[in-house]
Amino acid sequence: MCLGSLHLPTIVSARWHPLRVYAALELGIRAYGAALPWLLPGMGKWYLNLSQSAGQDLLARGTIAAFCLLPATIDFPLVESPEPDEFTLIVMGDPQPATRQEVRFYANDVIAELIDSPALLGISLGDIVHDDLSLFESVNAVQALVGKPWYNVLGNHDINYDSPNDKYSDETFERVYGPPNYAFQYGQVHFVVLDNVIWNGRERKDSQGKTIGGYQGGLSPEQLKFVKNYVERVPLDDRVVICVHIPLPEVSLGVEIKRTSTTSYNKLLEILSSHPYTMSFSAHTHFNHHHFSGAEEGYAPANGSEHHHHNAATGSGSWFKGPRDIQGFPEAAMADGAPNGYILATFKGHDYRLRYKGARMPEGYQMAIHAPELIPSAESAQAKIVVNVFNGNKKSVVKMQVRGHGDWQTMTQTPGVDPAYQQFQKHDEATAGKDHVALPAGQVTNHLWSAPLGVSLPKGFYVLEVEVTDMFSQKDHSVRLIEVE
């Protein structure tokens, strides 16, 4: 403006009436203002490209900024922030409310108990909402009340379905949350967040009548290059944690594998093999599952360690389905028989431990013991006992005993459908109506253990005890009273 005032007399004839000069200036300003919304996107891309050239085009960037009446640079200080060696991350799979009412379910069934939580960070592993992207704002407002930094992963229900391809499918997510591929560090832990949802346009029939389109799990060469470039700079003693929505390894759910696993998983493991301390989180399936990968799948670090993938529990459980409890919340148990909830991941240096937390459940509620309602005395030794260890995996040790009768015996991991959930779901399916949607059918889960009771008992009531030691040496204990007739 100063330069304009100095040079205006040399450009404009003195014979012009001052009001004509003023009118011409106003007309030019209005024309410039009207054109700016169309010019800014292109100028913004140009400025961004210049800014990535490490300051080599500072004059050009300054010219663009001056033209847009913006500063050439925005400078801010970096202030050292102490980080404890040990911290806890809230790992939330699929909050996924479809309506404002379900946002309120999520708020009071799940988030309310996290207010004043000692955890330092939170992350949602995709499906932040269920198709209605206008609910991002409401979910953000709810999670903000926890008062912790909260990171987000893109899920298949967080995309724009009207996009003809993957390139533009995440535009709303990016407007609200920023890039879907990024990394952040806390202490000795490096979190790498990746968008592994590939959108191929709405489902449709091709000329041969074959269904095409929809989504699938996968990682692009550019994403793998991003991971490679990042981990090359990570110290070998630090831990790398990959966070995605769709599981990385194959998880059998009776549906298309391409929608429940990630192509290029083996290539990702090959890249991660340069580091001995890695793991990953996903959600999407709405049940709790663990998978361990070694050299046979491409992960071969020098120390021979495994890559632990945790397909985590979901905040919405079974999509807020099922009958309402006395407080008005849906039952929402997941199809593996575990209650809806989240994972608390605690890191100390590069070591970690995981703890399951059922929504509005006591911290010690880590298992459900299933036994016959009434056991005939003559058949008591053969009575089948089933235990659902909600966060159990092949490295868990599960033991049981009848107190005062015999020794502890080790139970056998027995994949199957949780019997109590199966019975409850059948009743719910038969009685569901306008007030709620029935729970989904039970799914085969690996976190069931079973064994015969193992002792002959006379008529009476007895204390059946179960003790679980998980892969982190965390112990849990529970009891069930059984009746023998």
Image (spheres, grey):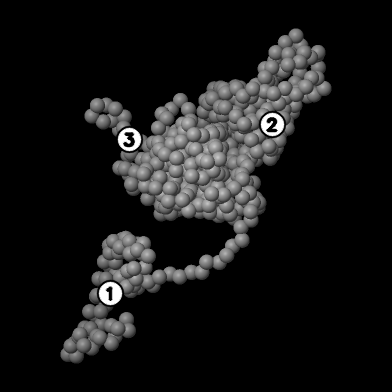
Q: Nearer the viewer, residue 449 or 7?
A: 449
Question: Callout 2: helix, strand or loop?
Answer: strand
The amino acid marked with disc number 2 is Val
Give the left or right position of residue 457, taking residue 66 as reference. Answer: right
Q: Residue at x 57, y 65 (%)?
A: 80
Mark 3 nearby-residue class (10 Å; few <14, some 14–19, many ≥20):
some
**Measured Cα–Cα span from mark 2 to mark 3:** 45 Å
What residue would you read off at disc 1?
29
Q: Is residue 18 above or below residue 472?
A: below
Farthest-out residue, bottom: 14
Q: Which mark is residue 468?
A: 2
What residue would you read off at disc 3?
213
Q: Quadrant of the C terminus?
A: top right
Q: Quadrant of the N terminus?
A: bottom left
User: Residue 185: x percent and y percent?
Assistant: 53, 54
Give the left or right position of residue 223, taking residue 425 as reference. Answer: left
Can the viewer see residue 235 in this picture?
A: yes
